[in-house]
Image (spheres, helix red, strand yellow):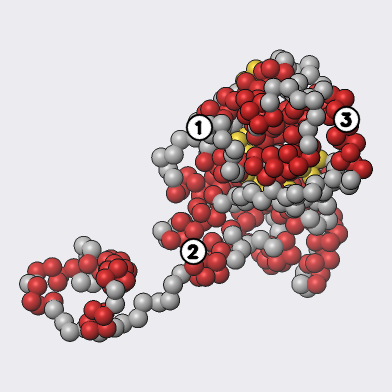
Amino acid sequence: MDQDTVNEMPSLIGRRIRQARIAAGLTQDEVVLGLAENEIILTKAGLSKYERGGSVPKAKTLMGLSRVLGVGSSFFFEDREVNVQWLAFRKAAKLSKSSQEKVKVIAADYVDTFMSLRRAMEPHRKVDPVPQTQVRKLEDIETAAMKLRDYWKLGMQPIESVTGAIEDGGGIVIDVDGENDLFDGLSGWADETTPVVVVSREVSDDRRRFSLAHELGHLVMQIHAKIDKKTEECWAHRFAASFLVPAEVARRELGDKRRRLDFQELEILKQKHGLSMQAWIFRASDLGIIEQSHARTLYSEMGSRGWRRVEPVDFEGEEIPTKFRQLTVRALAEGILSRTQAERLCPSILRETADHLGPPISAMDARTLHKLPKAERERLMEEAAALVASDYESGGLLAGFDADGEEDCLDDSF
């Protein structure tokens, strides 16, 4: 280990201790108490010194910290390789600074692991940056949304899964605890090219889709710095609605001009496009399909019926991120990750994998095998061949048998 590495070690370990503590949602006092329960005495000042990189904990203290913080001991020595730049954080004013920091730390660690896995499993994959659009007026928002739909080849049909569209496009979607409904979305760039969108897992599918699209708006719209934050958020809302339901589609569904909209019609459209009833009213008003006065009447009526928080129909979508779990399972299958590592990355992944496996292949004699249907017989033969394939490879246990004739290999049993 060179001198520079030695000098950097306290800073790295301290930074990782702090990240793990924030991700666990613990204060320094709570960590000190947890260590005491593990018979490790450390003062709050001592913990603070470790986090600042002033000194390095002894091995026993690091082991105690790993138990209290719920991470492996190797976590403290792993430096983050991916640079994440956060751009927008949509949250309620009541969300505390510590909770905001917790969301960012959890998301950044997820991105780092995700990118490492993807580099290992898809080394030749090149993620092109998504197209960005200069936005100076409302019409530019519609253009930006359509440009992204075209780039991802989504056509004009309802988007089955916004999460899937982002992941298929090379982006990263992370769902986290919603902090008591105080958090909606966070967006940024990993290594300046990979879009990252973080959303709450505790909201309805239509709200999650809208949040995902809203955060995409922050990433792809290049808005002039003089635009105030409130206007920028309104424009991101319009981008979300435009991305989910392009203007052409909205007019096809509603018509070019309407005097009134019916709630039953909005229920049908919500279930078809995954855009809430309230967002459909916004969309129709923004496009001039209905007058703003009628939109206000509809909002008021929804409020009187108690539909502003919970609408009368639900949208059942597929907005669960799957790419990270897919990469983990693939890495496990190809021997890149151990079972312990895979379980640490994706808790319960081993049980889920076992549930999907069939019963183990057992030995059977040739007569029993011959009685099976042809398709089942061929499936068993292929599985058996796959199990012993490595033994016949060069240097394998049975490599020498390729010199024998066919009659030397025949047997009565399988």
Task: Give x and y (percent) for residue 315.
Answer: 69, 48
Q: N-terminal of the two: label 3 or label 1?
A: 1
The disc placed on residue 153 is: 1
Say how many tags the image has: 3
Dot 3 crowding, Cα within 10 Å, few <14, some 14–19, many 20+? some
Distance from the alpha carbon under mark 2 to that under mark 1: 37 Å
Question: Image quadrant of residue 305?
Answer: top right
Q: Nearer the viewer, mark 2 or mark 3?
A: 3
Kindly identify the amino acid type of the residue bearing the numbered disc 3: Arg
Look at the numbered discs 2 and 3 and tell me whether their residues touch, using CB distance below 8 Å. no
Image quarter of the C terminus = bottom left
Task: Give x and y (percent) for residue 311.
Answer: 80, 47
Residue that carries the numbered disc 3 in the rendered image: 296
Q: Is residue 340 above or below residue 52?
A: below
Instruction: Identify the residue at image location x=52%, y=47%.
Output: 116
Look at the numbered discs 2 and 1 and tell me whether their residues touch, using CB distance below 8 Å. no
Camera-side residue of 249 and 101 = 249
Residue that carries the numbered disc 2 in the rendered image: 338
Q: Nearer the viewer, mark 2 or mark 1?
A: 1
Task: Give x and y (percent) for residue 320.
Answer: 62, 51
